[in-house]
Amino acid sequence: MKLISAGAAETVTGSCHLLEINGLKVLIDCGLFQGGKKVEAKNYEDFPFNASEIDIVLLTHGHLDHIGRLPILLKSGYSGDILATNSTNHIAEVILKDSAKIQQEDYKRNIRKAQRKGKEGKIKDPLYTLDDIPAVLSSLKRIEFNENINLGNKVVAKFRPSGHILGSAFIEIDSPEGKIIFSGDLGNYESSLQADAKPPNEADIVVIETTYGNRNHRSMEATEAEFRELLEQAIKNQGTIMIPSFALERTQVILHQILKQQQAGRIGKLPIFLDSPMATKFTKLYQACANEFIEPIKLELQKGIDPFEPNVLEYTVTAEQSKAINHMKGLTIIIAGSGMMSGGRITHHLKHNLWRKNACLIVVGYQASGSLGRLLVDGRKKVKIHGETITVNAEIKTIGGFSAHADKDDLLKWISSTGNAKAYLVHGEPKVMKHFKQSLNSRGRQAEIVKWGREYQLNQ
Ligand SMILES: [Zn+2]
């Protein structure tokens, strides 16, 4: 067995791992690098392997940092199947089309910028366009959770629930050469939607993510109480409550949390807007798949309650509908993309409301340095939005506990089921990985931090 990583090696994005097992070349995930120019430049580098030699691709889940380089893989010569769960198939279509659209828009904007500076000809082509997506979609094949999938050469793969987002899986691969497990992204064991990741079987090797390998999340009970108090306070102020949200999973968690507060009688009916076409698409998918979630959600469904539709939710589709929200007076909740507030419809709502003393911004996701969200969280009193300077009088509050990722204790619990499997650490910042490696070593386990492009002989 041999492993070569082409992403998520000493970083948290760009997941892409090539496994050579019993004469078969299997690629696990093919994600985009995200987060700043330096990291994103890696998307233009060649893969450290020959794409046309890969036999099959397996996807752990539909996040862009796990699937976003698939169009490049196909353009580099890959022509085989791409296996993923049913929900991941649906998610991949939305995510890849959106990614292509952003690539094209960024390219056009960069061209205009260069023309104004008189520096034409230096602009990189978009990584891919909408025309490249149909080929990926027709290579996608649906598989079932827990199904034994014969990949050829006596290599068998099994996708098992990982509790991270809808459709997410970790993958166990068995062969005469040995058994290896790829964790993909593991879920928060206290998620309000997803069941815990299934305990993996014993294996020889485990390739594990380490995003939060150095710390634990606040408990869900404390997080929910925090959210409730913020909503209650904001309702007293009778202003606009803005929740910038990531379209996939986090939006649905927030919608469900608002419904829970309404069911407990903490907050009454109030106008709630889901102002993100992409989040709306994913919410419809979550509604259609609600049976895949934890028991309380299934029970709600049996009672005829939609777990992702609080009272009174409105989906705003067109730009006109979105603008109309800003003419409303009094208390409203607006959930809008993008999550880090660097673009999207949330920026219009921020422009209209940040100067108001009775408005409230509730930040429920990670804010990368350099994003508008980070400036606001850091307490900036004036920010620029669409070229206009806006004074910040609104209350800015952060809630960190709604993460979709396993924390350190969750990771240690999950890996403890793999027996003596040697751990190869991926998908983490170097400092965090070092910490997690020490935690494994102190438990008598072997662990290695995976480096980009290096070849690892696994069965020695
Ligand atoms: Zn993920």
Image (cartoon, rainbow, N blue to C red):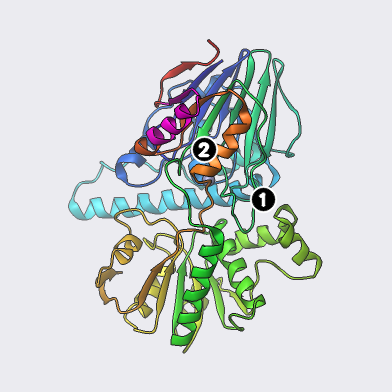
- Residue type at numbered disc 1: Ala
Q: Position of residue 329 (x, y in %)?
A: 46, 89
Q: In the drawing, what numbered circle is on residue 71?
A: 2
Residue 442 seen from this side: yes
- Tally of numbered tags: 2
Q: Earlier in the sequence, mark 2 or mark 1?
A: 2
Q: Nearer the viewer, residue 180 or 390?
A: 180
**Is 116 left, or right, of 371 in this rendering?**
left
The stretch in magenta equals: 433-450
Query: Which residue lies under the disc numbered 1?
Result: 195
- Residue type at numbered disc 2: Pro
Q: In the drawing, what numbered circle is on residue 118?
A: none
Point out the frontmost of discs 2 and 1: 1
Q: Is residue 378 above or below residue 42?
A: below
Q: Nearer the viewer, residue 176 or 370?
A: 176
Residue sitting farthest toward the left: 118
Tell me if label 2 and label 1 are in contact, CB under 8 Å.
Answer: no
Residue 447 magenta-highlighted: yes
Residue at point 50% right, 29% down?
Answer: 443
Residue at point 52% right, 40% down?
Answer: 66
The verdict on label 1 being within 8 Å of ligand 1 is: no
Residue 202 magenta-highlighted: no
Q: Position of residue 179 (x, y in %)?
A: 64, 21
| Quarter in which the N terminus is drawn | top right
Q: Of helix, strand and loop, which one carries label 1?
A: loop
Q: Nearer the viewer, residue 384 or 452?
A: 452
Residue 238 seen from this side: no
Q: Of helix, strand and loop, which one carries label 2?
A: helix
Q: Position of residue 428 (x, y in %)?
A: 42, 38
